[in-house]
Image (cartoon, rainbow, N blue to C red):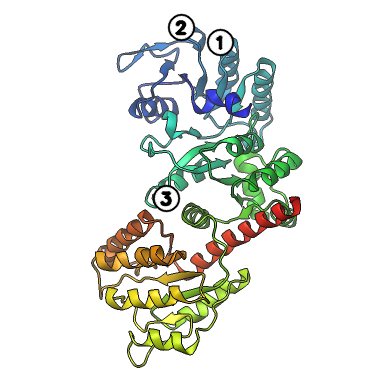
Amino acid sequence: MILEEFQPIFHPRSIAVIGASNDPTKYGGRYFYAMRERSYQGKLYAVNPNAADIDGEKVYARVQDVPDDIDFAIVAVAAPLVVKAVADCAEKHVRAVQILTAGFSETGSAEGTEWERQMARIARQNGMRIIGPNCFGVYSPESALTLLPGPDFPSEIGPIGVISQSGGFTSFLIRKAMGLGIRFSKVISYGNACDLNEVDFLSYLEADDRTKAVVAYVEGVRDGKRFLDAVKRTSLKKPVCIWKGGLSGLGSRAVASHTASLGGSKQIWDGFFRQTGAIPAVGVEEVLDLIVGFTHIPNFCSKRLSVVGGGGAITVAAADALDPYGISMLEFPPETQQSIRRYLAPSGNSVRNPVDVGTPVFLPFTLKPILEIIARSELVDAVIVEHWVTNFMPSFVQDLADVIPSVRDASGKPFVVSLPGPCSSSDTIDIEETRWKYREWYLSQGVPVFETIQRSAKALGKILQYNEFVQRRKDQQA
């Protein structure tokens, strides 16, 4: 069973850091210190023939000298020494090895490519598994494992699983997600994938009950048919969001030098997304938007929305953003319009849907009744509210923050907040801090927050498309 097979990787009872040192600027030293700081509960061993101890802890010259069995070894030595380290691990019967070192097939050199083949062959012959080389490794909050640059990553467990050929993407994604209250089940940076690859890790996350949605950054795949089948299978159980790198000419060349992968054509990947139901994304921001959406409104299937904001441009922006996904904004009947207008100025606004309140500043005693009227409408299944934080109301107001969650709870309809950022001047830092407070509050109440109307619409549209895909497949199988 795959969960048992991967137990030494995500829940190791013992770890050996090969290349550990007193120098925290080096990979081995940084990883060893990170595991100590994170209070790893298993046995942690340092291996380095050139060091006697690290802060008083014994260092072993070879992994074979460690007196206990080793589940998981972290290799952080120079590229020419890695094959020997992998062979030593095989002799020690280490169950899995994570190779942080770069300098292999991604360089395009015959020597580096041959080293990679040798380590894969050693692993295959000895029943040992390898993550990498050229990777940041595994982040598993439950067992205190972390990526190379993440000693301070959260220890809380969340519902999102990530697989990525890029270590930089995984690290940046986790840090950006921290401020959004997003937490992860497992994150794997697997680099060149000389042994374990995207299919293996996706199959694990498919079976992992803690993982409710999967994000993947993929530059190229080792076995297209297996990957297609794995994504098809997983998508029917949980959302799979994929950022496919290297679809342009320049991108494909960058991919080849990054992880020695073949990118594949855009046409092939467009067909892949149609067949599998996986959700395409480009860039960290879109990935985060989809995570936020699937975390808070995973079953979103509304096609009739109302948009509420302050400023006429929201009419055009909302319509343009929602239309490609078949989401409509139906005009309110006269009685609904009259009910809304009672709370607005005589002119300078619009109440047809979308609703332009005529000012970017919301007041609790006018916003709440307007949203209640809209939520009662049979023409509305969900509501997007564009909430601007400006110098007209620069402080956090709890009564205002309470409005959207309370109307959402009373109506039972999904509410989404668009929370645009202020101008980028340093003079607006106080306003930006207030915006963060509103964002944190809404997210803590289960209300998804996006930076713009367009990003809100795109995330909702893709969640809708995914849920429609799953329903079609279920209907076909019935």
Q: Residue at x 32, y 62 (%)?
A: 438
Q: Which residue is drawn at 42% across and 13% down?
A: 50
Q: Are marks 3 and 2 in contact (CB under 8 Å)?
A: no
User: What's the mark number on residue 176?
Assistant: 3
Q: Can residue 234 be spotted in the picture? A: yes
- Residue 366 lies left or right of residue 254; in this view the side is left
Mark 2 residue crowding within 10 angstroms, few (<14) / some (14–19) / many (20+): few
Q: Can residue 148 be spotted in the picture? A: no
- What's under tag 2, amino acid-wise? Pro
Q: Which residue is drawn at 55% across and 80% down?
A: 330
- What's under tag 3, amino acid-wise? Lys
Q: Distance between the Cα atoms at labels 2 and 1?
A: 10 Å
Up the image or down, 32 lies above or below 336; here it is above
Q: Position of residue 472 (x, y in %)?
A: 70, 57
Q: Are marks 2 and 1 in contact (CB under 8 Å)?
A: no
Q: Distance between the Cα atoms at labels 3 and 2?
A: 41 Å
- What's under tag 1, amino acid-wise? Lys
The residue that disc 1 covers is: 92
Q: Position of residue 291 (x, y in %)?
A: 50, 52
User: What's the mark number on residue 67?
Assistant: 2
Q: Distance between the Cα atoms at labels 1 and 3?
A: 39 Å
